[in-house]
Amino acid sequence: MHRSALVRLGSLGLMLSLATAVPADARAAALPGLADQWFVTSDSVRLHYLSGGSGPTIVFVPGWTMPAEIWEPQLRYFVRSHRVIALDPRSQGASDRVSEGNFVDRRAQDVHELLRHLGAQPVVLVGWSLGVVEVLRLVERFGTADIAGLVLVDGLIWVTPNSSMEAFFDSALVHLLRDRRAFTATFVRGMYRTPQDPRYLERITHAALSTPTPTAYTVLASAYAVGRRDWRSALSRVDRPVLCVGTAFMRETADTVRARVRDSEVEIFEQAGHAVFVDEPERFNRVVERFVQRLR
């Protein structure tokens, strides 16, 4: 893949998601008011999540290769008035690295089992990037009994067969295997629209690379390159309010959500990159807070 194409991948902010790795023993200092907790899935995988605060519960699900701490601006903000939970999906963050279950259906089931483990009243479930597909698959398989509302953040829901987007993902996967370090570094630099500290970008790259390359490939391919590539039908199962937040590139996706989900609203961040909640955290937090408040 030409270097300019990799930059485009980052700037469009497709499904690849990266984050800062924070050692477990440093999390308390880095994110005051939050605790490290774990639960074991039905297939015996130990998953980590951050937990803090009290009140209505918001659960944050990150995307491809990311740990929970990518949601730091939201965790710091909402922990003052809500119970906040941020998951490390399997093979990411502080969760177990495993060779099995690294595909959309199982990861969606992991989130469902987390909600049951929490035992809370229905939660607001926030999914970003690949997390959007996983959240929709959860709803499709298990319904919305545990969910008060959904926030879908800059996630591509379908890839049209024989399209340029299909070719783009196929090419990206090849280059992910061929030189993952270069691929990841280029993507990270293009993911943000606002300036980021070089040390921060270095940490993000390191965190992304901590997920084994075969696993990273399998997770991404399961959503957009092999088998099912279109998750729009899951929207028909959504019977809870939805907030769809996206960059300008995701406008068609947002319009599809608005057309298919009766109680839905859309917020487009014209000047943000894929990590909209890092680029514009204050605005993002206000939009989500307003949505959560109307669910009460």
Image: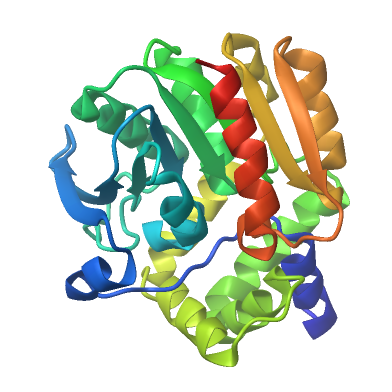
- Residue at 20 percent across and 29 percent down: it is 117
Where is residue 141 drawn, in percent x and y?
Answer: 43, 17
Q: Quadrant of residue 236?
A: top right
* Side (left or right) of 149 relative to 37: right
* Side (left or right) of 249 relative to 102: right
Q: Quadrant of the N terminus?
A: bottom right
- Residue at 16 percent across and 48 percent down: it is 38
Residue closest to the far front:
80
Near-viewer residue (288 or 157) = 288
Q: Quadrant of residue 171?
A: bottom right
Where is residue 127 drawn, in percent x and y?
Answer: 53, 40
- Residue at 36 percent across and 70 percent down: it is 212
| Vertical comparison of 108 with 88: above or below | above
Instruction: Decide if residue 15 is in sight here.
Output: no
Where is residue 249 drawn, in percent x and y?
Answer: 85, 50
Query: How did the renderer colour the structure?
Result: rainbow
* Side (left or right) of 265 relative to 211: right
How many circles with numbers are drawn on the protein?
A: 0
| Vertical comparison of 265 with 11: above or below | above
Instruction: Decide if residue 8 is in sight here.
Output: yes
Near-viewer residue (215 or 137) = 137
| Vertical comparison of 173 with 291: above or below | below
Where is residue 47 drawn, in percent x and y?
Answer: 22, 49
| Vertical comparison of 141 with 76: above or below | above
- Residue at 57 percent across and 36 percent down: it is 133
* Side (left or right) of 138 relative to 183: left
Residue closest to the far bottom:
198
